[in-house]
Amino acid sequence: MSFSSARAGAKSTQGFLCYSFPKRIETFAVRTTAGVNVLEKRAADDKTFDIKVADWGYVSIERQNELARQAREKAVADKQEQQLRDAYKVKHVGARVCQDQKNIRFQGTVEQVNGDKVKVFVERAGYIGAPDLRPGGFQQEYYWLNAWDVYACE
């Protein structure tokens, strides 16, 4: 296979990745106004291949998965950090608080505060995105929770 360097601006073009069998050699091709550029990966740790195809706009499935994993981890960390920053908003009697568990939002009122713990009377539960729908079997109850495990409801 031949290789010619991609010109500037090749990121806006469409490319495709294929594998040569039986050795599963990665080959990436991109069409530009100058023609078709093809690059074959010669070794598993071929950084030149990875850099060049990235310049051409390709993101490998492995890299996409890694970026998605990092984004999920960052979102969880950001949410936890925000909850810690906002814990003071729920650490007083009468605060309206919520907690999301999967697709259900629980809503209640803080009745007691003891350090970082709050006693919440959970009054209602509804599906996130459809708050008028109620999960079956819900009963109002009291719970002692960490202040950072709930957030102030609007």
Image (cartoon, grey):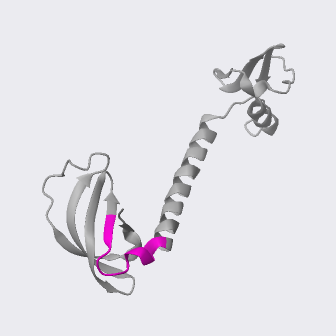
The residue stretch that appears in magenta: 86-98
Which residue lies at the image location 60% right of the left edge and 35% below the top edge? Answer: 61
Please state which of residues 67 and 126 is positioned toward the viewer in this rendering: 126
Q: Residue furthest bottom?
A: 114
Which percent across, then down, holds residue 126?
24, 53
Number of dots carrying numbers: 0
Figure quadrant of the C terminus? bottom left
Residue 128 falls inside the magenta stretch: no
Please state which of residues 80 and 107 is positioned toward the viewer in this rendering: 107
Which residue lies at the image location 75% right of the left edge and 28% below the top edge? Answer: 11
* Residue 4 location, quadrant: top right
Residue 88 falls inside the magenta stretch: yes
Q: Is residue 40 visible?
A: no
Q: Tell whether 75 sits left or right of 91.
A: right
* Residue 37 location, quadrant: top right
Which percent across, then down, holds residue 89?
42, 74
Which percent across, then down, holds residue 122?
22, 68
Please state which of residues 116 and 109 is positioned toward the viewer in this rendering: 109
* Residue 59 location, quadrant: top right
Q: Tell whether 101 sits left or right of 65.
A: left
Which percent across, then down, holds residue 83?
46, 68
Which residue lies at the image location 31% right of the left edge and 70% below the top edge? Answer: 96
Q: Is residue 108 visible?
A: yes
Does 48 appear above or below 21?
Answer: below
Figure quadrant of the N terminus? top right
